Image (cartoon, rainbow, N blue to C red):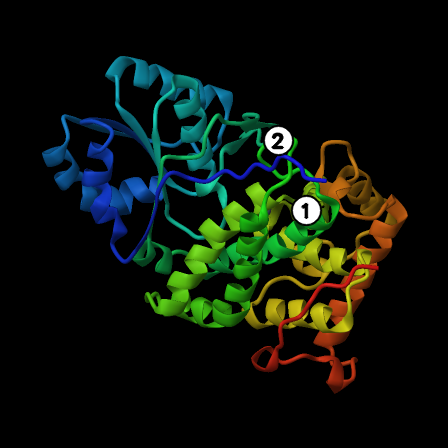
């Protein structure tokens, strides 16, 4: 039986050292008037380097600073600004929340938008959805847009100077992509395009490429950011974190790892950790939840340890977490509309709590050298490992 599939993509993806130099020509393709939303870092550090060529090339380049949260109030402020200035195109520069905000404005006004992430920490730049928050920082809704951003520009020099923690977190988010894609593929589950339809071969293959790229180049890329320098490995990881992970989650779909992440956000102790760090914990728990084999479990843990992702609940603020608290996480991850449903087999809350305890214990046991040497797979000897579900 065949099904209707749906994949979605950003219009154009540009990446490389000093890629922000392409901004004048990329903006001009849409017209001479542009309004930009910049995070405070971009206003201070990047704007002075791009302002002059943009003013020279365009009739209007008006930059406004982001208020730090993607709220309806901030969206309305920018809609008003755009109504006054009549831009041909909107631009967002900064982290995921600034980009999510400008995507909402662009969709509301029917304008094209250009995304300029300054870190490779999330896959927000490429996607056709935004997470809208209340003024006090709680998630209000997921807003789907009619299309993906028209242009995504990633300047690898800028990314190389961002905090190391952010590129590592981006790898945590990207690491889950293939596992979740694989579950969706087995189940023929709907992806994250809000179409209710599954993705295609292309999306599943990109998710696998994302995983292979991380394992091959992740350690070097982290070192490159520590040295604040651009290398071929860093370029590959920026692409994996931003483009491959974005296409993978959106067109292939999400499953247990992100559902557990969403559950973890219910516990205030985890609020000091960024998205990708909690996704990594969600992924490790999902390995035990779905009964993955020894080799793949060790591959994931070895990689997480090698780049410094959390491998224990303690690492995300849950040192003395109770079973009752883990039950809150489990129940939230099973809510209708969340992605746990995309796992091919029935899963209940008790099984999720057990898997989180097991993953935590496994992380601890590895850290304290309590496992036999043979179970620790070395990344450099890795084979093409297939997933085995129960
Ligand atoms: Zn994610």
Residue 83 or 383: which is nearer the viewer?
383
Please say if the residues under marks 1 and 2 sit with CB atoms less than 8 Å apart: no
Q: Secondary structure at mark 2?
A: loop
Q: List the single residue furthest toward the front.
A: 1
Residue at (18%, 27%) from the top-left corner?
32
The residue that label 1 is drawn on is: 261
Give x and y (percent) for residue 19. Answer: 26, 51
The residue that label 2 is drawn on is: 138
Determine whether, in the image, residue 115 is placed left or right of residue 187.
left
The quadrant of the picture occupied by the N terminus is: top right
User: From the viewer's perspective, is residue 163 above or below residue 151?
Assistant: below
Q: Quadrant of residue 106?
A: top left
User: From the viewer's perspective, is residue 12 above or below residue 36?
Assistant: below
Mark 1 and mark 2 lie on one chain; the one further toward the N terminus is 2
Residue 194 or 379: which is nearer the viewer?
194
Q: Residues within 10 Å of mark 2 (few under 14, many from 20)?
A: few
Q: Residues within 10 Å of mark 1 (few under 14, many from 20)?
A: many
Q: Is residue 8 visible?
A: yes
């Amino acid at each position: 039986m065949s099904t209707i599939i749906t994949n979605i993509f950003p219009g154009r993806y540009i990446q490389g050292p000093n890629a922000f130099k392409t901004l004048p020509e990329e903006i001009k393709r849409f017209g001479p008037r542009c309004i930009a939303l910049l995070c405070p870092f971009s206003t201070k550090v990047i704007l002075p380097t791009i302002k002059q060529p943009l003013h020279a090339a365009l009739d209007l380049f008006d930059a406004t600073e982001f208020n730090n949260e993607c709220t309806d109030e901030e969206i309305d402020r920018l809609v008003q600004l755009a109504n006054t200035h009549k831009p041909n195109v909107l631009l967002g520069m900064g982290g995921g929340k600034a980009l999510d905000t400008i995507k909402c404005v662009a969709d509301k006004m029917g304008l094209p938008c250009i995304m300029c992430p300054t870190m490779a920490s999330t896959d927000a730049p490429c996607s056709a959805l935004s997470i809208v928050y209340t003024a006090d920082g709680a998630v209000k809704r997921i807003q789907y847009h009619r299309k993906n951003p028209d242009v995504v520009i990633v300047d690898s020099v800028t990314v190389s100077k961002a905090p190391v923690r952010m590129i590592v977190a981006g790898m945590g988010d990207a690491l889950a992509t293939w596992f979740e894609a694989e579950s969706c593929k087995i189940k023929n589950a709907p992806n994250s395009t809000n179409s209710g339809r599954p993705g295609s071969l292309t999306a599943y293959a990109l998710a696998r490429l994302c995983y292979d790229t991380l394992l091959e180049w992740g350690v070097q890329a982290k070192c490159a950011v520590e040295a604040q320098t651009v290398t071929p490995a860093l370029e590959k990881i920026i692409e994996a974190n931003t483009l491959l992970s974005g296409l993978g989650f959106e067109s292939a779909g999400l499953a247990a790892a992100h559902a557990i992440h969403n559950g973890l956000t219910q516990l205030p102790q985890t609020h000091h950790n960024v998205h990708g760090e909690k996704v990594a914990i969600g992924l490790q728990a999902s390995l035990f939840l779905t009964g993955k084999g020894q080799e793949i479990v060790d591959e994931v843990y070895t990689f997480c340890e090698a780049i410094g992702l959390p491998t224990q609940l303690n690492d995300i603020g849950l040192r003395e977490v109770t079973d009752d608290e883990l039950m809150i996480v489990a129940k939230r991850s099973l809510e209708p509309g969340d992605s746990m449903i995309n796992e091919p087999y029935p899963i209940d809350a008790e099984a999720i709590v057990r898997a989180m305890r097991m993953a935590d214990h496994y992380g601890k046991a590895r850290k304290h050298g309590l496992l036999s040497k043979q179970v620790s797979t070395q990344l450099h000897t890795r084979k093409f490992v297939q997933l085995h579900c129960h």
